[in-house]
Amino acid sequence: MNIHRKIADDLVANDVSFVTTVPCKQLAGVIDEIEQRDDIFHIPANKEDEGMGLCAGAFMGGKRPAIIMQNTAIGVTINTLATLTQFYRMPLPMIISYRGELREPVACQVEMAVHTKALLAQMNIPTYHFHWQKDVEEFDNILKYTFMCNKPVAILTDANFWGGYGEQ
Amino acid sequence: MIRSEILREIAPIIRDHLVVCNIGLPSQELHMIDDQPTNFYMLGTMGLSSSIGFGLALAQDKPVISIDGDGSVLTNLGTLPTIANNATGNYTLLIIDNGSYGSTGDQPTYAGRKTSLAAVARACGCDNVFEVQAKDLGPVLQEAIDNNEMTILVCKCDSGNIKVPVITMDPVVIRHRFMEAVAK
Ligand SMILES: [Mg+2]
């Protein structure tokens, strides 16, 4: 299974047509795939809260948005998630590279990894963790769930899911 | 002129267009002066007016005006390269630059000192950037909305606030009403 293609296919099948990204090494493949898709408008953002603002506008303009970012961005976007996405009740699938988990070579990444699930839980953000490649099978249902409940939803994707950091 | 006087003057120009208005006093003033379903009031999230408005402009064809402030743009400077590199003709960014953080007690911003937001916007790659004095804004804004080129307006004005009530409308009501106006 090509997980990059599967993620992009599911986005398109769920009518997600506006995707903003802030890159991470683990996300390079899926960002490439999204950039190539004609039915997805890809707009790189400089910071993740900026990206969430773009997504909020796109949603109000009638498009289904998504953001792709690293888990360190949770530290950047708490205020935006609370006062924009959640306060105005907007849906936002967040495909998150979960750095600092098993097979992580960079020690500093663990420092945000240990806070990631706690912060998401504190924010009452529904959170899914993809560790095995087969976990991607849930992605389609997670997207449907996100646009059903109009909430930000986190999909944490760790190095094992992507085939190992730098080992691909 | 101060911001509330500018908003009063441009209200007839922006009334029928989609407007994303900055957090704090700008939204409260616009809400008091000319509340419209086509106004999206930010109740939080300083800095994202330009991003929300730009996402909206990319997602549909109607003209969109983001009303932003100098302090708010400084807090989200990364927005300008994104806007410049994905330009869309239906978007106008109006930065009301009073050189101060108006909503928090008029502390000076760097835009009121050495930093030129118009020069920053140009350096970020924005093509149609105009710095205008408050008294000249009306016709320039009208032209920016009417033409099919994305425009960044930096409107220099005095700092100062008037007494305005907070917006008590529920955010979901603001959003729903706005989305109905967008879809109309
Ligand atoms: Mg100001």
Image (tube, coloured by chain):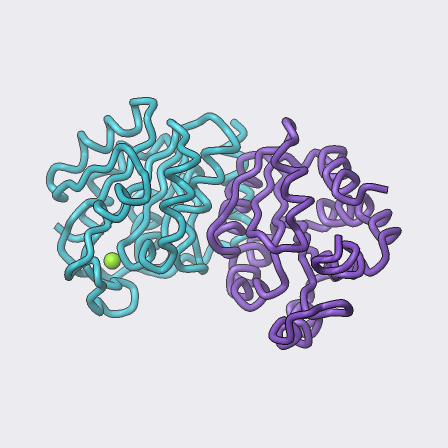
Residue drawn at 82 percent across, 49 percent down: A136
In the visual, does B143 lie left or right of A68?
left
Q: Position of residue A104 (x, y in %)?
A: 71, 68
Q: Position of residue B126 (x, y in %)?
A: 31, 38
In the visual, does B29 lie left or right of A143?
left
The purple chain is A
- In the image, is residue A38 above or below residue A99? above
Residue drawn at 60 percent across, 41 percent down: A19
In the visual, does B65 lie left or right of A157?
left
Residue sticking out furthest to the top: B147
In the visual, does B10 lie left or right of B18?
left
Q: Position of residue B129 (x, y in %)?
A: 24, 37
Residue drawn at 33 percent across, 31 percent down: B150
- In the image, is residue B17 above or below residue A95? above
Residue sticking out furthest to the front: A167
Question: Which quadrant of the figure has residue A97?
Answer: bottom right
Q: Nearer the viewer, residue A91 or B39?
A: A91
The cyan chain is B
Q: Nearer the viewer, residue B48 or A160?
A: A160
Q: Nearer the viewer, residue B162 or A98?
A: A98
Q: Position of residue B21 (x, y in %)?
A: 37, 48
Count of numbered badges drawn on the protein: 0
Residue drawn at 64 percent across, 68 percent down: A123
- In the image, is residue A75 above or below residue B83? below
Q: Classify the position of ligand 1 by quadrant: top left, top right, bottom left or bottom right.
A: bottom left
Residue sticking out furthest to the right: A134
